[in-house]
Image (tube, grey):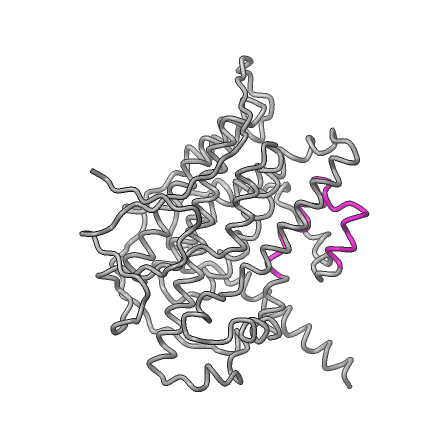
Amino acid sequence: MTKVQWTDDAPRKIQQFAGADFPRENPDLEDVLTSEDVEHVAEIFQTPLTGSYNWDYKVQDDRIKKLYDLGKQLNWDPEMDIDWNRPWPEEERIPELMNLHEYQPYLDMDEKTKDEFWLHMNAWSLSQFLHGEQGALLVASQLCSCAPTFNAKLYAASQTFDEARHVEVFNKYLQTRIGMMYPVNTHLKSIIDKILTDPRWDMKFIGMQIVIEGLALSAFNTVRETTPDPVLKDVVYLVTRDEARHVTFGVNYLEEFVKSLTDEEREERAQFAYEACVVSRERLVATDVFRHFGWDVEEARKQVLEGFVMSTFRNLLFQRVIPNLKRIGLLTDKIRPKFEELGILEFENLATDGDIDWTQLDRPLDTQEAQSYEQSMLGQFHDDVHAKQEEDDRLAS
């Protein structure tokens, strides 16, 4: 019989999996799970979800119907559409990206420990992708019940299957390529908890479709352009195709609904979106890794956040979220100064995901494209970093 261990909180231990591809020697991990003694660890959450039937089966929005049709046509299989047998490439360590090149605890590490540190950083980042996808899976399944229209229910069902596939593919990558999995970041967990337990369907749309999925799109694009692993390039390429539809769905569906809210209701949702963005910025810092290697967590956190590259990267992740919030009407006059204080209001006039490029969304699967796709996201990132550095140097002189 399957063993289920019920817990009041998410586990905080690292898991190791035997037989992974990544070359390493005897990592010192807190917890080892094997196929012989594994058990299912589950945490309960309660939600006052209000569902609805729909007895009028007419499709009322052709855009949502087309997104649903694309979801049916562009299904992919992690076992068939990804070649998992490719060898692991050489990976370059770039401590400057995290402002560690002058940080003494990092400099005190020997080369073997530094290799282990970067393995843990990789495992931590990809683990958060996995946990976020499970959150998206649970939210999408809720939307099947609580979304108020027939076409939204259909699309939510197709998204639920997408998210299940994303959980599957990141889980397989972590277990077979990396061999290690970190627990969910507490900041990410707090956002997912809030989205899952809020009874209002539109709050779920705002939190998941606009904020979390919007940030994921930017993060996936960056990973695809920077990882040396061709397997991971394919994984995030295929996941990104799905996520683009999800964010587009959220923008198109919420745009008209938000107009129907009272000013008070709109401000409440704008505040929620802002708070989700604030918490999301914190989830980019791998404090669990710092703790594992015995570093002073708060000191290491400040060191990373004060680095120019990380501070710039954290802001660039919001290039999709901010214009989407503006389009749906949640960048209100009251909330704008708060986003400006975060330094991310500058993105408000960029293109939104409501401006659908159907030729991009419905192109056929081609994992080779993931290898040869021009490095637009990375190039833009470097351009912005250099431009900011030149401006700072000009002002300093």
> Where is residue 25 shown, x and y percent of the image?
25, 74
Please tell me which residue is depicted at 77% across the width and 52% down the height of the picture.
336
Quadrant in which the C terminus is drawn: bottom right
User: Measured along the vertical axis of the image, is residue 375 above or below residue 237?
Assistant: below
> Where is residue 319 shown, x and y percent of the image?
63, 55
Q: Is the magenta stretch mostly helix, strand or loop?
A: helix
Quadrant in which the N terminus is drawn: top left
> Where is residue 86 shown, x and y percent of the image?
27, 61
User: Measured along the vertical axis of the image, is residue 243 above or below residue 300?
Assistant: above
Q: Residue furthest front?
A: 8
Q: Which residue lies furthest to the right in this view?
A: 333
Left or right relative to 303: residue 289: left
State the extent of the magenta-drawn residues as a range. 316-340
User: Measured along the vertical axis of the image, is residue 313 above or below residue 246?
Assistant: below
Q: Nearer the viewer, residue 336 or 324?
A: 336
Q: Which residue lies furthest to the left in this view?
A: 36
Q: Nearer the viewer, residue 88 or 36?
A: 36
Q: Can residue 173 be seen in this view?
A: yes
Residue 390 lies within the magenta run: no
> Where is residue 146 shown, x and y percent of the image?
54, 27
Q: In terms of image quadrants, where is residue 202?
A: top right
Please tell me which residue is depicted at 44% across the width and 49% down the height of the picture.
9
Q: Is residue 357 visible?
A: no
Left or right relative to 246: residue 337: right
* Count of numbered badges drawn on the protein: 0
Q: Which of 239 and 356 is in front in this view?
A: 239
